[in-house]
Amino acid sequence: MPLPKRQHSKTRGRKRRTHWKVTVASLRACPQCAKPVLSHRVCPFCGYYKGTQIVETAKSK
């Protein structure tokens, strides 16, 4: 693997890293209980995913 002949400056390395940003998690409303839930996850409040109950919760018993 080739190596650089000279050391890169701190500014040049930081310019390269400017695009490393944290994105906000996309939330959606649960169709059963209307609470905000991460996409493609089982709702932790009611236990439903895509209209079917996947997990038994204390409220659903």
Image (tube, rainbow, N blue to C red):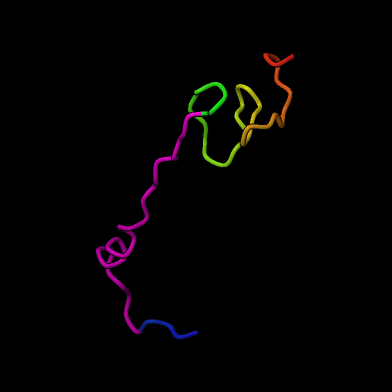
Q: Give above or below for 54 relative to 25.
A: above
**Residue 18 is one of the magenta-drawn residues:** yes
For the C terminus, the image quarter is top right
In the image, residue 4 lies at what x, y percent?
37, 82
Location of residue 51 (image quadrant) = top right
**Foreground residue, 45 or 1?**
45
Residue that lies at the very extreme toward the left in this rendered image = 11
Q: Which residue occupies 44% across, 40% down? A: 25
Q: Is residue 31 left or right of residue 27?
A: right
- The region drawn magenta spans 5-29
Q: Which residue occupies 68% across, 32% down? A: 52
Q: Give above or below for 25 relative to 55.
A: below
In the image, residue 50 lies at what x, y percent?
61, 36
**Foreground residue, 11 or 17?**
17
Q: Is residue 22 left or right of residue 45?
A: left
**Residue 44 is one of the magenta-drawn residues:** no
In the image, residue 29 lies at what x, y percent?
48, 29
**Foreground residue, 41 or 31?**
31
In the image, residue 48 lies at what x, y percent?
64, 29
